[in-house]
Image: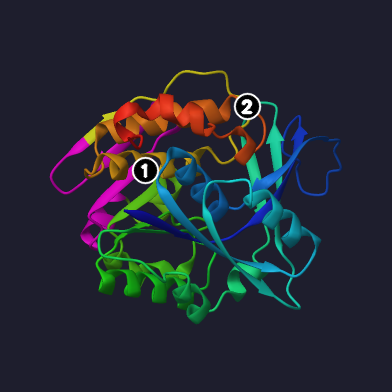
Amino acid sequence: MKAYVIGNAALDETLAIEDFPSPGASIFGESLSRDLGGKGVNQAVAMARTGLQCVFVAALGDDSRGRDITERLAHEPLNARLIRLTGVSTDASTILMAAAGENAVITTREAASALTPEQALAGLDGAHADDLLAVQGNLSAETTGALLRAARAIGMHTAMNPSPLQPYFAPLWSLVDTAFVNEGEAEALGGVDHLLDLGIGTVVLTLGAAGAALITAAERITVPAVPCAVRDTTGAGDCFMATALASAALRGVALDARALADAARAAAHTVARPGTVAAFPTQAEFATILGPETQPA
């Protein structure tokens, strides 16, 4: 089985602040890290580090940020299919990290939104039934819809993290097998029951320090979070989603309580360290988190 993650790639600049500013305020900040980021990159790198074969597709500008991202991805165990776009700026994120550990993320999407359906679908070359497609909210409505329809036609399993929230999601939910949402996203989308009614097979609801829940029409399984000292929450949700999907895929099963427990351990590693991709578990750490049965013989 292979995972195809199609989304955005960005460079993250994280600034530590005492508290989030009010409108019109000027505040001091401290530079914490400059790291690979973007929800697409985050999910692809985490999946690849688990040992799951992963193809990552994203658009970059022909600029210094794009070259930096390309060089950094070359050190990750994934197949990066990067599309260079002229006249387009590579995306970037500014992350404000408050002293309490909460963050706010501002991300550009010029390159991500410029990825055409044709370019994205070319990235699915080699996909087969039972492979996995993971998408987020950074691509255009046309590209996201084309990917989900193509994946459904192939027989792939589809997973979506609807972040950032977009108005075009509503007609696409029937093409999504598994949705990963936090409490705020679930509420904005009408609630978990509403999402299930729209045709999603499984909803994974992340609950922060309260853990996460695996919800279908037939059952609800709750898994606790792993206690840890929180230093930087950036990318933790992406790491959680990627680990849960990979844990199940590597064991050849549907999402289950163990997948969420594995994901909780990986997320705890992430929030205890600064940075985004740099804070994710390494390949060796993932081997310990997931257990020997998920590793190749």
Q: Element type at marker 1?
A: helix
Q: For this rendering, which residue is in front, 59 or 102? A: 59
Residue 287 is at least partly visible in this image: yes
Q: For this rendering, which residue is in front, 239 or 62? A: 62
Residue 211 is at least partly visible in this image: no
What residue is rendered at 49% in x and 65% in y?
Answer: 166
Judging by the rendered image, the residue that carries numbered circle 2 is 273
| Magenta region | 192-220
Q: Position of residue 233 (x, y in %)?
A: 58, 34
What residue is rendered at 55% in x and 31% in y?
Answer: 270
Q: How many C-alpha atoms fall within 10 Å of the one at disc 2: few (<14), some, or many (≥20)?
A: some
Q: Is residue 169 left or right of residue 249?
A: right
* Residue found at the very far left of the displayed protein: 218
Q: Position of residue 248 (x, y in %)?
A: 29, 41
Q: Is residue 108 magenta?
A: no
Q: Is residue 158 left or right of residue 105?
A: left
Determine whether 280 is above or below 125 in the image. above
- Say which quadrant the C terminus sits in: top left
Judging by the rendered image, the residue that carries numbered circle 1 is 246
Q: Is residue 215 magenta?
A: yes
* Residue found at the very far front of the displayed protein: 297
Q: Is residue 254 left or right of residue 236?
A: left
Q: Position of residue 236 (x, y in %)?
A: 52, 37
What residue is rendered at 63% in x and 46% in y?
Answer: 75
Counting residues from the start of the chain, the first of labels 1 and 2 encountered is: 1
